[in-house]
Amino acid sequence: MNKKPARGRPGPGVRPPITWPRGVQAALCLTFDLDAETAWISRDPENLHRLAVMSQGAYGPKVGVPLLLDFLDRHALRATFFVPGWTAERYPDVVAEVHRRGHEIGHHGYLHEPLEGRSRDEEEEILRRGVQILEGITGERPVGYRAPRYEITRETIGLLRTHGFRYASNLQDTLWPYLHPGTPALVELPTTWIFDDGPYFAYGIRPPLYRQIYPPAAVLSTWTEELRGMHAVGGAVTLILHPQFIGRPSRVVMLEALVEYARTLPGVWLTHGRELAGWVASDAAQAGTDGRPRPGPDREASPGPARRRAGPALRAAARPGTAGRARGRVLGAAARRGTAGGAGDRTPGPGARRGTVAGGADRDPGAAAWPDTAGRQAHGIAGPASGRATGGRAPASSDTSSRRRSRRS
Ligand code: ZN
C-alpha cells in the first residue's frame, strides 16, 4: 500500500475531509437506478392498468440498459445499478446481463415503496426480500443501498449494518463521502438533485408530472460546471441516472460528452459505488464521520506560503476560460460524431482499469492501493502537477475482456 496518499487539491480555505488515493483529485461515481415500472406504480398503483404509463418505465430495461451497457463498455467504465426487487423479478435476464458485464447490483427497495411511516419490521422485510431476490440472480449479496427517492428513516442505517451492507447513497449534506458513526463501517456516498437526471428529464401525465424537459446541452452545461467546481474542492460526484430517462439516444451522447470532459480534468477517478466505498472505509482514506471540510492551508499557515501551495486545480478554477475551452472541444467532438460512439480508444478511468483489483479492495478495503507514477500513466491519471489526464492509451477492449474473464473465473 502507498504510505503517503496524496490529498486532493482544494481551495485555499478548506481541504477535503478525506485522503484520496495517490494521483486522484476528485471522484465521479456512476450510478443508475433501474426503477422500470416501479417508478410509476409507486406513484399511483392504478398505473398498473395504464399501459402507456407502464411502457415509459419498461423503456429502461428494454432499450435504455442495452444502450447504456454499450456506452459503459466503450469507455471501459463500471457502474452501480440499484434495482428494486420487483424490477429484478420482472427482468431477471437484464439484471443478470448487467452483472455479467462487470457492474455492481445494489438494493433499491422492492416496489420502489416510500419508507416514511413504515415500522422497523416492515422496513426490514423490504430489505430482506430485496436481498434475497438480487442474490438469487447474481449469486452475491448486495452491499450498496439507495432508498427510493433517497428517503431513509432513523432505522435504516442500523438495518443496513445488520444485513451486511457496506454503503448507502441517499443524503445531500456534504460534498465528500464519510462514515456513518458506529460500527461496522457504513459509508455514505452523498447525492444531490443537481446530479440526478430525474429533475431534468422525468415527465408524466398520470399522475401529473409536468416538468420542463430539458435539452441535453443545458444538462451537460449544468453538470460540467458543477463537476469543475467539485474537482476544485476535491469532492466526490455521485451521478444518479435512470435508464428510462438517460437512456434516450440524445442523452447517451450527452453522457459521453460528460465523461470525455471529466477526462480532461487531472486526476478524476471514474468509479462505482462499491469501489469508492471500499476506499472510503479503508484506513488510508482517513474519512471522517460528518463530512465537514477540514481547515485549509490558509488557516493553518502564514498567507504567503499558503498561496504558493495553492494547487493547479485552484488556479485553473480561477480561469473560467480553461474549462470552457475544454468543454467546447468535448461538445464539438460529440456534435461532429453525431452518434454515440467513436470513443472506444479513450484511456479507461482508474475504476475500470482496476477491475480485478477492486475485488480485493472490496474484501479488504485497506488493501486498496493506488497505482504509483508508472501505474498512473498507464491508467491515464495525471499526477498533481501535470495538466491533463488523457495521456495513456490502454485499449478499452482488452480491459473489458480481461474483466469478463476474471469475472467468469
Ligand atoms: Zn428509484
Image (cartoon, rainbow, N blue to C red):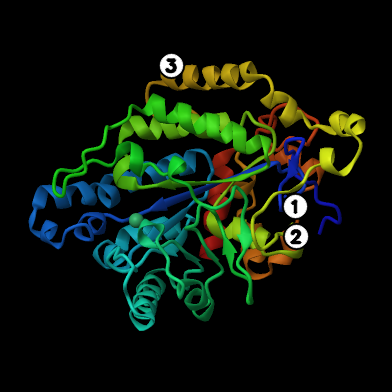
Q: Return the residue nearer the eye: 26 or 212.
A: 212
Query: Please, what secondary structure does the residue beneath circle 1 have?
Result: loop
First reached walking from the N terminus: tag 2 or tag 3:
2
Q: Is residue 157 above or below residue 24?
A: below
Q: CA distance from mark 2 to mark 3?
A: 44 Å
Kind of residue at badge 2: Gln
Q: Gap in Å between the C-alphas at discs 3 and 1?
A: 39 Å
Return the disc, 2 or 1, that comes first in the chain's sequence: 1
Residue at image mark 1: 19
Above or below, 44 relative to 378: below
Q: Is residue 268 among what the camera can see?
A: yes
Task: Answer with the quarter of the image where residue 128 lies.
Answer: bottom left
The numbered dot on residue 286 is 2
Q: Quadrant of residue 260?
A: top right
Which numbered disc, 3 or 1, marks the residue that appears first in the sequence?
1
* Residue at 66 percent of width and 30 percent of height: 390
